[in-house]
Structure formats: structure tokens, C-alpha cells
Image (cartoon, rainbow, N blue to C red):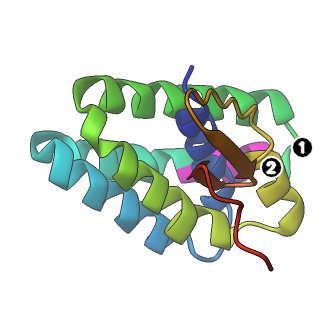
Amino acid sequence: MDPLTMAAGSALVGAMATDAWKQVRDGVVALWRRVHPERAEEIGRDLEVLRGQVLQAREAEDADTEQALEGMWRVQLQKLLQQDPHAADEVRRLLDDRLTPTLAPSERDRVYSVIQHQTVRGGSGIQVGRDYHQGNASPPKA
């Protein structure tokens, strides 16, 4: 599974248990509205159900259910990107701008601990966190 969808699915489920869940829901529905407008309302209803399930799982300290919910939304996001690969930039923005900022630092670390892989041919590449620099020049000095 694509690391972006893995991270976004995990962040989505984590963010649904925060006070910012309405903004999270609105961001995800807006993504679907742009990519698959015919499914946007259904996704909105699904997210309402998801929030209830996440809150119940957290109250019961049921990590297995929470992981299963992450898996379900990872699959949803993966299908979205398979149908429209150009939506990856929008999913990345959703992850970075709406989902991850709502999470506690420990959850952010977990979301971004996906395996990163880099292949560079004909130059050099430096990858730090979410940033990627490619070319023959040295990376910018901090």
C-alpha cells in the first residue's frame, strides 16, 4: 500500500477523536467532492459513523478496532488514488494541512513513521522528513 494512503488513513482516524473533527470531516468531504462528487455526501455520512466508532474504541481502549478502522480508510484512500492518481497532491495537502496538525505529537510521529524510499539516477538526492531535494547542488544550509 502506498505510504501516503497509510499515513492519511492513520491521521484521519486519529483526527476524528479530536476537537477539530468537523474541520477534518469537511476537508475529507471537500476532497471527495472535487475528485468524485457523486460520492461526497456518502463519504460525509461514513465519516460521521467513523467518528462514533473511533470514540467508542478509544473509550474501551480497543486498539484493534481502531487499527481496523485505519485499514478501512486506508483502502478508501487507496481506491481514490487508483481512480485518480492526480489526487495524490490533494491527499498530501489534506494530510499536512488538516489532519496532522490536529494530532498530538506522539500521534504525528506515528503517522509520519512510514517507510520512505528514494531512488535517484543521474544526480544526487537528499531526503529529510517530508522534504525532498534533487539535483547536483548541495542542499540549502540551515
Q: Identify the image quadrant of residue 34.
A: bottom left
Residue at 89% x, 43% y: name it: 61
The quadrant in which residue 121 appears is top right
User: Tag 2: residue type?
Assistant: Arg
Q: Residues within 10 Å of mark 2 (few under 14, many from 20)?
A: some
Q: Which residue is mark 1?
A: 61
**68 drawn magenta:** no
Q: Where on the picture, by quarter, is residue 65? A: top right
> Does 4 sit above or below residue 91?
above
Q: In this image, 110 relative to 12: left or right? A: right
**What's under tag 1, amino acid-wise?**
Glu
Q: Is residue 26 above or below residue 107?
A: below
**Magenta: predominant secondary structure element?**
helix
Residue drawn at 85 percent across, 67 percent down = 105
Where residue 103 sits: x, y (%)? 73, 66
Q: Which residue is mark 2?
A: 58
Name the one closer to the observer, 142 or 96: 142
Q: Residue at x 12, y 47 (%)?
A: 37
**Is there CB contact under 8 Å for labels 2 and 1?**
yes
> Which residue is at 62% across, 48% downward?
13
Left or right: 114 in relation to 71: right
- Alpha carbon of mark 2 to alpha carbon of mark 1: how far? 5 Å
**Residue 81: where, in percent of width, then height?**
34, 31
Total marks shown come to 2
Going by the image, does 116 lie left or right of 98?
A: right
Viewer can see residue 65: yes
**Quadrant (top left, top right, bottom left, bottom right) of the N terminus:** top right
Secondary structure type for disc 1: loop
Q: Nearer the viewer, residue 134 or 76?
A: 134
The magenta region covers 51-57
Secondary element under disc 2, as helix, strand or loop, is helix
| Quarter that holds the C terminus | bottom right
